[in-house]
Structure formats: structure tokens, C-alpha cells
């Protein structure tokens, strides 16, 4: 059997027989298990114990699974933790909402423990890929970070390494405004001793090279720049 390297999985489930079944099978598969039988404790454990994975039941005392999922996936400190939701057959709508809130997968009760172990391994493998190597896209712009390549509508665009870094930083934080100071710090590596207009100059050049995709980078007056959400 594939080694699971003792990763910790948090199981949040109020039905003890389901909890025991999962805990038993996951321990057998080499995982370390921590548990919670209500939503409030589950959320606290997720935040304090930093598990590698969370199995989250939908219907829980004190706080519903959906609420926990939403909170964890909107918090930068926990959003990377994959979540597998457990749902009953009748909870189809909740399941869909859960995926919208960022749950990684779901399993419908009754389930085969073996199936759950396989799914968890697949999700963990997927999430272990370094974010640096994943393609980023926004509208017609696609970045292949591993190859340092940028394309607009499939056509290569040649950027300097600085322009590349600037675009990648903006795209990694798509939808969020990046202040000039912060960009200088992260892209150029300067504390803000250099004139922040340097950023404006480079954004102007970058937009020019992006051609028709130039409008994907928005100026937010008085703050900085962001890559549009759509
Ligand atoms: Ca339940």
C-alpha cells in the first residue's frame, strides 16, 4: 500500500459509527487522525491543529458543515487545506453550494471507506503540486510559470523577467488590488525607497505588450492595480 507519511486528517462528524469507520480505515492507510463531533470544535481544531486534510460532515450540531467550509476557504491561513464533504443523498443542493464554497470533493453516505481513502489520496496528490508550477489564466491571458511563458489568445508574448514577475504577482492575486508599495517590495524586492511611479511605468509597458488583453489590468485610483475577475 502507498505510504501516507502520517499526514493528519481531521474528521468532523457527529455520527459515531461513521466517525469510527473512517478513523479506522484511514489509520490503517497510514494517516494520523484527529476528530471533532460538533461544528464549533471542528472549526477550532481546523484552525489550531493545521491538518493536512479535513473530512467534513454537512449536518453537524452547533455549526453546519457549509458554514465551516465557507469560513475555512475564505481564510488565507486555512484555505489551502483540502475539504472532502460527507453528505446524505437528500442534501444535493448543499453539496453543490459546498463545492461553490471551495470544498474539493464530496462523498455521499453510505460510502465505501476504500473509496474515501482513494479520493483523499487523489486530492492530496493534486494539492501537493506546487502553486508556482500551475498555469494561471485571466481572460485571454495564460501564464505558464514553469516555462516563464505568457500568451494572449494562444499567441506568445515576450516579457522581460520583471514584467513577467509583475504580471504573475497580479494574476496570483486576481481580483484583489495590489498597492504600488507592495508590488515594489515583492516584484522588485525593494522597500519603498524607490519612486512608486516605477510601478506605473512597468504596468504601462506590460499593458502595451498584452495588446487587446491590456484592459485585464485595472488601475484603482489612489491604490494600485488589479487583474480583473472576468
Ligand atoms: Ca451529521
Image (cartoon, rainbow, N blue to C red):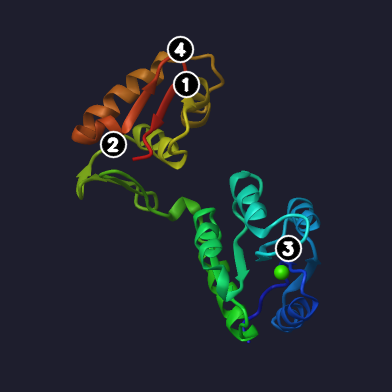
Image spot of residue 11 (x, y percent): 73, 68
Please state which of the two labelled residues, at mark 3 or mark 1, is closer to the viewer. Answer: 3
Question: Label 2's element?
Answer: loop
Please state which of the two labelled residues, at mark 1 or mark 2, is closer to the viewer. Answer: 1
- Between disc 1 and disc 2, whose residue precedes? 2
Task: Tell me the CA gap for discs 2 and 4.
Answer: 22 Å
Disc on res. 159: 2
Please state which of the two labelled residues, at mark 1 or mark 4, is closer to the viewer. Answer: 1
Q: Residue at x 20, y 47 (%)?
A: 153
Say which residue label 1 marks: 180
Taking the image as four quarters, which one is ligand 1 found in?
bottom right
Answer yes or no: disc 1 within 8 Å of ligand 1.
no
Say which residue label 3 marks: 60
Answer yes or no: disc 3 within 8 Å of ligand 1.
yes
In this rendering, the answer to whether 93 lies above or below 218 is below
Badge 3 vs badge 2, beta-carbon distance below 8 Å: no
Within-10-Å neighbours for mark 4: few <14, some 14–19, many 20+: few
- Between disc 1 and disc 4, whose residue precedes? 1
Q: Which of the pair 63/130 is nearer the observer? A: 63
Disc on res. 195: 4
- Between disc 3 and disc 2, whose residue precedes? 3
In this rendering, the answer to whether 188 lies above or below 73 is above
Task: Tell me the CA gap for discs 3 and 4.
Answer: 53 Å
Q: Residue at x 23, y 41 (%)?
A: 157
Task: Tell me the CA gap for discs 1 and 4.
Answer: 10 Å
Amino acid at each position: 500500500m502507498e505510504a501516507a507519511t502520517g499526514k493528519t486528517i481531521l474528521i468532523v462528524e457527529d455520527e459515531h459509527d461513521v466517525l469510527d469507520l473512517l478513523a479506522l480505515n484511514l489509520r490503517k492507510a497510514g494517516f494520523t487522525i484527529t476528530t471533532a463531533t460538533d461544528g464549533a470544535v471542528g472549526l477550532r481544531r481546523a484552525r489550531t491543529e493545521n491538518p493536512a486534510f479535513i473530512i467534513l460532515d454537512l449536518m453537524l450540531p452547533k455549526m453546519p458543515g457549509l458554514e465551516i467550509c465557507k469560513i475555512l476557504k475564505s481564510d488565507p491561513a486555512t484555505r489551502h487545506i483540502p475539504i472532502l464533504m460527507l453528505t446524505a443523498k437528500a442534501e444535493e443542493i448543499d453539496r453543490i453550494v459546498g463545492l461553490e464554497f471551495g470544498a474539493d470533493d464530496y462523498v455521499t453516505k453510505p460510502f465505501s471507506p476504500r473509496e474515501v481513502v482513494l479520493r483523499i489520496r487523489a486530492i492530496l496528490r493534486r494539492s501537493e503540486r506546487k502553486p508556482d508550477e500551475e498555469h494561471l489564466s485571466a481572460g485571454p491571458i495564460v501564464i505558464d510559470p514553469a516555462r516563464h511563458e505568457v500568451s494572449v489568445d494562444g499567441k506568445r508574448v515576450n516579457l522581460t523577467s520583471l514584467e513577467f514577475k509583475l504580471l504573475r504577482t497580479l494574476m496570483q492575486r486576481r481580483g484583489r488590488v495590489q498597492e504600488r508599495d507592495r508590488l515594489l517590495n515583492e516584484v522588485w524586492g525593494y522597500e519603498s525607497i524607490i519612486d512608486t511611479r516605477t510601478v506605473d511605468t512597468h504596468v504601462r509597458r506590460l499593458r502595451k505588450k498584452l495588446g487587446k488583453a491590456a484592459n485585464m489590468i485595472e488601475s484603482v485610483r489612489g491604490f494600485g492595480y488589479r487583474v480583473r475577475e472576468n
